Image (tube, rainbow, N blue to C red):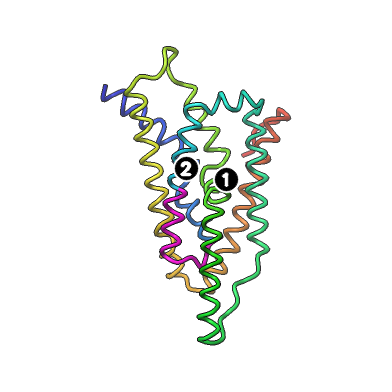
Amino acid sequence: MWNEFSHAFLVIFTSLLPVINPPGAALMVLGLLPDATQKQRAQVARAVAFNSLVMLAVSISIGAWVLSFFGISIPVLRLAGGLVIAATGWRLLNAPAQPERVSLTGAAQAEARQDLDLDATVESQTFYPFTLPLTVGPGAIAVATAVGTTSPEQGPEVVHVVAAASALVALCALIYLCMRYAGRLQALLGRTGMQVMLRLLAFVILCIGVQIGWLGVSELLGLPAPH
């Protein structure tokens, strides 16, 4: 039983970990919330980790059935997800730089307004785009769906269910830790360094979206997979 548990755990965990890339996802979310407070960052981390757990569990358990019911293929899923990610990167790449605060009074007022705006942003965007597609994107959904279809013909046993649940909890705990403490990088880089990193991250996000979208197009057209 232990061998079956460890095998199922490692298959699911190692299959999803490089696709989700929790440190990379945390940096992308940090790029969209560069001025978030520690409280807001903790709120985002909890929400994204929970949403990711639900999405991955659904993808593994009934993902293939849902896609089949709506007539959605994996290449189409990749193409749509790539377009969404590319659009997010483009928006972030063209976002105006945060202005400097010129007075203590103005800084206090601006900070109060900013906190209210960020609270609204955090509440409305924890699922989209922070969870989908920046953390659990089309690649992760495709992998989770594929893993879910490899269960034995007689159906998954209790040990397989426990192993899958343990692997997903471990992944989402890692997602939480990375997003919760990504703000420390902001403190190390400073304001100018953050602006530089945000532009670089935006370009990387744009490239990731184009890559995923092109992979979907290649699969739809029957072309060799891009390298």
Residue picked out by circle 2: 52
Which residue is located at x 47 percent, y 42 percent? 52
Give, as a three-letter code, the residue at label 1.
Pro
- Where is residue 95? Give x, y as percent: 65, 65
> Where is the C terminus found, in terms of image quarters?
top right
Residue 215 shown left or right of residue 28 in the figure: right
Residue farthest along the right direction in this orientation: 221
Residue picked out by circle 1: 133
Residue farthest along the left direction in this orientation: 2
Q: Give the quadrant of residue 90.
A: bottom right
- Where is residue 25? Give x, y as percent: 50, 51
Q: Which residues are magenta?
A: 33-48
Real-space Cα distance between discs 1 and 2?
Answer: 10 Å
Q: Give the quadrant of residue 96.
A: bottom right
**Disc 1 or 2, which lies upstream in sequence?**
2
Q: Main secondary structure of the magenta part?
A: helix
Q: Is residue 35 magenta?
A: yes
Q: Secondary structure at mark 1?
A: loop
How many labels were placed on the picture? 2
